[in-house]
Image (spheres, grey):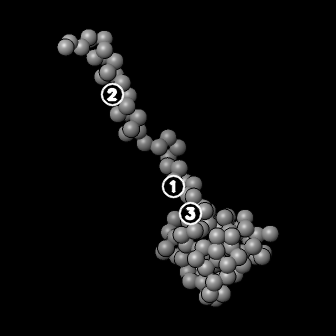
Amino acid sequence: MAVSSKFRRRLVLGLGLLLFACTEGPRSGNSLSETQPRAKDLFTTHCSSCHGAAGDLGVSGAKNLQKSKLKLQEIKQIIREGKNGMPSFDGIIEKENQLDSIAQYAKKMQH
């Protein structure tokens, strides 16, 4: 069965565009997952076992995040360095944007 040259050109053009779209890099410099980490997922992975999903679990002396009055920078410092029974997450949460996301998520729990 013969394929028309018009169809063949469209097929080649379509495949070329598809390959270009699949190999083109991010348009804004960083991918969405790098620039906007999913805060809830990060919090669940690193924090909820002690603080709970709502921030009020208090396992092993973990502070109730809902009652916290800490500022964003203070939260980030505690995540980085640890405090009292909370270990340092320096080296575990290595990307600054992930640290920012977790701290902002914890800050939003405050009442």
In the rendered view of the protein, which quadrant contains the C terminus? bottom right
Q: Nearer the viewer, mark 1 or mark 2?
A: 2
In this view of the protein, can residue 96 be seen by the observer?
Answer: no
Which three-letter amino acid code belongs to the residue tagged 3? Answer: Asp
* Distance CA(mark 3)–CA(mark 1): 14 Å
Q: Is residue 9 left or right of residue 89?
A: left
Find disc 2 in the rendering and name its residue.
15
Residue in view at x 26 percent, y 11 percent: 5
In this view of the protein, can residue 51 be seen by the observer?
Answer: yes
* Distance CA(mark 1)–CA(mark 2): 29 Å
Residue in view at x 70 percent, y 76 percent: 56
Among the two numbered marks 1 and 2 on one chain, the one whose residue lies closer to the N terminus: 2
Q: Is residue 60 above or below residue 17?
A: below
Which of the 4 image quarters holds residue 76? bottom right
Q: Is residue 23 left or right of residue 45?
A: left
Q: Is residue 14 above or below residue 94?
A: above
Which three-letter amino acid code belongs to the residue tagged 2? Answer: Leu
Find disc 3 in the rendering and name its residue.
41
Find disc 1 in the rendering and name its residue.
34
Q: Position of residue 34 (x, y in %)?
A: 51, 55
Among the two numbered marks 3 and 1 on one chain, the one whose residue lies closer to the N terminus: 1
Q: Which element is circle 3 on?
A: helix
Which residue is farthest left? Answer: 1
Crowding around mark 2 (Cα neighbors within 10 Å: few <14, some 14 to 19, many 20+) is few
Q: Position of residue 105 (x, y in %)?
A: 66, 64
Q: Nearer the viewer, mark 3 or mark 1?
A: 3
Q: Which element is circle 2 on?
A: helix
